[in-house]
Image (tube, rainbow, N blue to C red):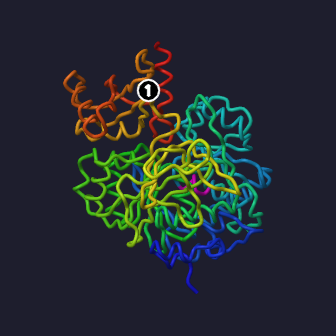
């Protein structure tokens, strides 16, 4: 009997998808389900590699499903020996590594709640999250622990060689028994460290729903060699980059350490990855590295998420990897709701488009009163869930073919002299200039126009009046005569969220403080 992974076309996705078919891809059911079993244990006898850890600062490491099944079981027994009980939170502040995956899957296997924490959080960022989720244990390295000071609440354990050897005292078998609706992980969204972003609680059965994004957003299919360089401390790296592909028993690649585009490009060649999903920033850094042409690639599917991709970078990805780079849109709170069906030969990928909803999803662009916007007009992007329309806090348009286009965050709209402008569109236009490496646009107060656009540009070229005029003229020619940055500042860097997205709120706050 055919399963959903047997179908690759867009037409078949619409014709054959159902929730029942989705559940057929797993061992568990709606009552009893465990993510660690689905992603690790049931593949332990396959003989396949589970993880290839691409290290920025050392040799790559490979871990088999069998090794991970044994070690995560030992970690689960360790947790019980320390008095941890199902439902207890276990914070894991580690780079992608053998210790990270052992601790994460071991915690989930034992019915506890894994809480991945970004390794670049400072003491205040860690304290905010620890106070919020109240973990019993914080698993990290000795060097990170030394930077945190006194973390009140959890016991801090350094996962070093001594600890790893001690785990061998525990049994390598662990019978899983968790409810499908029990919480498996807390996922913090990528806000700043000064303000605590929301923690989204994911149950074990969330994995079933998230596989929709895997099948149609990243195009996962049996036999893929999949890599995602995004940190598993964030939603894309954890759910789309780790759990969904491992649920299908794929060999996956992950990235540890400070990002270096050439290290990733080398790994694509060396490990013969066939499917890659990354942040738009990763592709931009690969393009800017200037060395992509030095390597050979086996990629058959490429996708991105996190923010829109500029046309120059999209062209680079197509020319370098031989395929259109496919957008996948969603949020930690609502999941993935727009995809481009990588690998589906009958689906046209339109440059700049977010794609169309995956099967089973209802998505609309609406006016403020809830009515659908006309084709080509900007409105609020809404998702239908549990009998009601839920806002995404983003703006979008739909074309005559049913393709969706991102028009920025609702709070990133700039209204100047009655004209409504998108910060994203202005940024994308600026990035077409060959000397512009990064760009951000915000609205700042203006007595005459209400607001004007102020842009911030990162470039290796020195700022000048001539450079400013070049950027302004480029935006005018790409967008419209009124839609350009009247003010432009050349800066050494842009504020980012921990997930690497440009943080326009910080820029707006700085401008407000300077008034």
Residue at 44%, 36% (x, y): give it: 502
Residue 65, percent from left and from top: 56, 68
Q: Residues within 10 Å of mark 1 (few under 14, many from 20)?
A: many
Q: Is residue 179 something that shows in the picture? A: yes
Residue at the disc numbered 1: 443
Name the image quarter holding residue 40: bottom right
Residue 15, percent from left and from top: 54, 76
Residue at 46%, 75% (x, y): give it: 8
Is residue 35 depicted above or below 18 in this figure?
A: above
In the displayed structure image, the side of residue 187 where residue 481 appears, left or right: left
Residue 44, percent from left and from top: 59, 73
> How would you classify the magenta stretch by its main secondary structure?
helix
Residue 275, percent from left and from top: 41, 64
Number of numbered discs on residues: 1
Residue at 38%, 48% (x, y): give it: 309
Quadrant location of the N terminus in the rendered image: bottom right
């Amino acid at each position: 009997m055919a399963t959903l992974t047997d179908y690759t076309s867009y037409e078949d996705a619409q014709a054959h998808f159902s929730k029942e078919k989705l559940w057929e891809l797993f061992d568990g059911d709606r009552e009893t389900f465990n993510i660690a079993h689905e992603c690790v244990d049931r593949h332990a006898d396959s003989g396949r590699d589970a993880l290839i850890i691409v290290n920025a600062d050392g040799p790559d490491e490979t871990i088999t499903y069998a090794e991970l099944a044994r070690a995560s079981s030992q970690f689960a027994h360790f947790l019980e020996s320390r008095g941890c009980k199902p439902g207890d939170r276990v914070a894991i502040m580690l780079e992608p590594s053998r210790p990270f995956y052992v601790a994460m899957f071991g915690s989930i296997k034992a019915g506890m709640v894994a809480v991945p924490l970004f390794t670049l959080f400072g003491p205040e960022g860690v304290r905010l999250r620890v106070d919020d989720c109240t973990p019993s244990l914080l698993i990290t390295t000795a060097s990170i622990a030394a930077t945190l000071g006194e973390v009140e609440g959890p016991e801090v354990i350094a996962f070093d060689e001594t600890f790893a050897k001690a785990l061998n005292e525990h049994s390598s078998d662990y019978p899983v028994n968790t409810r499908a609706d029990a919480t498996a992980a807390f996922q913090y969204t990528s806000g700043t460290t000064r303000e605590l972003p929301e923690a989204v609680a994911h149950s074990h059965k969330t994995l079933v729903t998230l596989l929709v994004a895997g099948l149609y957003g990243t195009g996962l299919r049996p036999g893929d060699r999949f890599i995602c360089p995004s940190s598993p401390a964030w939603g894309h790296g954890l759910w789309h980059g780790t759990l969904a592909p491992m649920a299908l028993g794929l060999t996956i690649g992950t990235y540890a350490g400070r990002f270096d585009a050439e290290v990733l490009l080398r790994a694509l060649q060396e490990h013969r990855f066939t499917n890659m999903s990354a942040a738009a920033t990763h592709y931009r850094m690969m393009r800017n590295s200037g060395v992509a042409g030095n390597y050979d690639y086996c990629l058959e599917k490429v996708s991105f998420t996190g923010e829109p991709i500029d046309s120059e970078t999209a062209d680079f990805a197509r020319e370098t990897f031989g395929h259109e780079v496919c957008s996948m849109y969603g949020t930690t709170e609502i999941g993935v709701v727009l995809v481009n069906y990588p690998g589906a030969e009958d689906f046209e990928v339109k440059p700049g488009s977010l794609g169309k909803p995956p099967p089973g999803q209802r998505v609309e662009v609406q006016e403020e009163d809830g009515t659908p916007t006309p084709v080509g007009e900007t409105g609020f992007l809404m998702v239908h869930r549990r009998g009601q329309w839920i806002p995404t806090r983003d703006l979008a348009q739909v074309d005559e073919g049913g393709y969706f286009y991102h028009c920025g965050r609702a709070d990133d709209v700039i209204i100047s002299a009655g004209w409504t402008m998108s910060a994203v569109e202005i940024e994308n236009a600026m990035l077409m200039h060959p000397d512009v490496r990064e760009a951000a646009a915000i609205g700042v107060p203006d007595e005459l126009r209400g607001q004007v656009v102020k842009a911030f540009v990162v470039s290796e070229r020195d700022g000048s009046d001539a450079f400013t005029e070049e950027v302004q003229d480029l935006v005018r020619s790409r967008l419209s005569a009124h839609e350009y940055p009247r003010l432009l500042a050349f800066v050494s860097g842009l504020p980012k969220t921990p997930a690497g997205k440009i943080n326009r709120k910080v820029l707006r706050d700085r401008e407000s403080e300077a008034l």
